[in-house]
Image (tube, coloured by chain):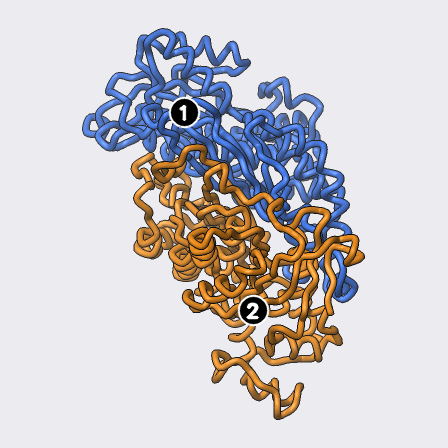
Chain colours: A blue, B orange
Amino acid sequence: MSERAGAKSGGAWDAYRAAGVDIDAGERAVELMRASVAATRRPEVIGGLGGFASAMRLPAGLREPVLVSSTDGVGTKTAIAMALGRYDTVGHDLVAMCADDLVCAGAEPLFFLDYVAVGRLFPERVASIVASVADGCELAGCSLLGGETAAHPGLMDPDEFDLAGFCVGVVERDRLMDGTAARAGDALIGIASSGLHSNGFSLIRRIVAENDLDLAEDYAQLLCRILGPETAAEPETEGRTLGEVLLTPTRIYSQAILRLRKRLNEKDADLRGVAHVTGGGLPGNVPRMLPEVLGAHVFPGNWPMPSVMRLFGALGGLSGSELRSTFNGGLGMVCAVPADAAEAAICSLDDDGLEAWEVGVVSETEALGGRYSES
Amino acid sequence: MSERAGAKSGGAWDAYRAAGVDIDAGERAVELMRASVAATRRPEVIGGLGGFASAMRLPAGLREPVLVSSTDGVGTKTAIAMALGRYDTVGHDLVAMCADDLVCAGAEPLFFLDYVAVGRLFPERVASIVASVADGCELAGCSLLGGETAAHPGLMDPDEFDLAGFCVGVVERDRLMDGTAARAGDALIGIASSGLHSNGFSLIRRIVAENDLDLAEDYAQLLCRILGPETAAEPETEGRTLGEVLLTPTRIYSQAILRLRKRLNEKDADLRGVAHVTGGGLPGNVPRMLPEVLGAHVFPGNWPMPSVMRLFGALGGLSGSELRSTFNGGLGMVCAVPADAAEAAICSLDDDGLEAWEVGVVSETEALGGRYSES
């Protein structure tokens, strides 16, 4: 953690601490996060640069490496974390948001950097946030190579924080997925999301406030109260509060997607498109993996809408198609594959513990009357 | 600008806009920033990825490329920008903070990504911020490859914003500067800062508040009032207000440092260390470019203290050595070079329009009694 480990010592720190920037707290935070960061170290990392920057070699054997990069935040999901005093999950969301954008281009995540802005630097909290970033990095297969913790006294409330992440991956030039491979008739494979992921939280918070919901209420009880006693909830929500269900970390798909591609290649097929379903939901993201002349036709009856979206749909007066454009609608990733490889794709994802469905078909934009339609 | 250009359309946007996230404003901001971003495009950039991520080839001819990366923010310098309603400078600071960390490892900046968090998305403001990021990228020689604008309604005040930047560069493995090259007796060359740069602003803001300073006051008049009529100010501060002087963009050194190294190499010398003087000032940063057994002995009489630091030193009761550990003390970069190359180094920097001085010498840590001392 280059900047974090900087030798901040000597000089006018007493005056600076009085201005709200506690250097010792920063150093304590660095100590607390050291082990979790070290666990993400890939063999390509080069250490000992003196702390100004971080360095990493490329994986061996690439003929024409292309660097792929992405930056993102977790939106106002942080506000739920603050309300619950939970700092050990949103870092995982942050990695998901960035690393899973890279695999849409076919890239393997290599390294990650995080930026944490806080009102006041509480070492245990920052270390907890960064440890959850490191957890996410392990799942995505990338090294947490550096980061910055910025204290903004006076500008942010002491308890407030914000996160930004940055991920770089690499792919062989002729393996780069550039959105041109899909063909009309390809199958769309949707992979189950773990819940809301990290988009739509400004709306979630408004609905929570307007309906005076209690984040500490038992989730099953709330579902029963709003949607009726026969409403089914996912087993993993059992015994959890509303706040805990809202904070469910965003699923990280990158390693499973890279494996899926490899397995399809072994069967002489290939992934023809990968869309990470974030802001804008299915209509905002699925067409982005397709050539302009093609669009996605989706069958929403083919997979279940998560209970948390049904709940907020009922509370906020949102239709099913609105839930699929504001949230992820239950699908965190959508892939395009040749129709005859659909079953193999679903099996490969199942091997990785991911539930997937054939959720639609790639069609001519002209025939669809647009780049996205549902039936 | 991948995420920014995402196809956010269709669906429940009316509900979402009511929750404070204005998608149309985001799209207008993207339109406004398009030209300035395009101006930073390097030939290695690969376009047309569908918007999930950004891609770039490595420069040709590298045998064993090492990626070097850095992330940083601009601290609470944003608060001064907000108070002045100036959004066209802090992006430049952001690039300086990140790109100039990379050259400390000998790396050439390749690409940059920015994260802008706002309370409310005012398209012209965000475009102005991003245009200043693009200006900085042009100076640093890197492509502004992507970015994220995040609206945090309810969590941040409408006028509030924060910035984080991420820069990636590349260097040939055997040209990587890893802090092991300096020798006792090497000269320390300090390069003039443009003022406060982007550190120490929490303290600056406290001193402004405690002394009830008016950011709109004429800077020369304020200097005269606090430090006396004979106080010299830098010519570039003439006719400017206190707020404008505080907002002076951080100087960007990367291209000049890369050229300096090339010129020294042509004379069979080399740069033996480069330290970017940011948080922690000279004592916090200069030793970071040296082996553990070596330290820096600095002669503060060899270069002038900027008037803005003298001013805030007087107002805040900070000594000269405190100004050099809280702020940059007038030096934005310090390099270690063989003693007989000091003059050539200063000439090279002068050719690039940078004022530089021989500011100290590399010595044994044991002889110095520490890693940093002054006399």
Task: Name the chain under label 1.
Answer: A
Q: Position of residue A43 (x, y in %)?
A: 58, 26
Dot 1 lies on which element? loop
Camera-nearest residue between A83 and B217? B217
State the mark number for residue B357.
2
Front-most of residues A267 and A42: A42
In the rendered view, does A188 fall on the left or right side of A32?
A: left
Determine the secondary structure under disc 2: strand
Task: Indicate which disc residue A62 carries.
Answer: 1
For the residues labelled 2 and 1, the Cα–Cα distance comes to: 44 Å
Judged from this view, the residue extending furthest toward the bottom is B229
The answer, for residue A197, to whether it is visible in the render is no
Against A15, residue A108 (above or below) is above
| Residue at 59% across, 56% down | B336
* B146 on left or right of A233: left
Residue A125, by quadrant, is top right
Q: Quadrant of the N terminus of chain A?
A: top right
In the image, residue B222 sits, relative to residue A350, either above or below, namely: below
Does the rendering let one see residue A296?
yes
Judge whether B234 appears above or below B186 on screen. below
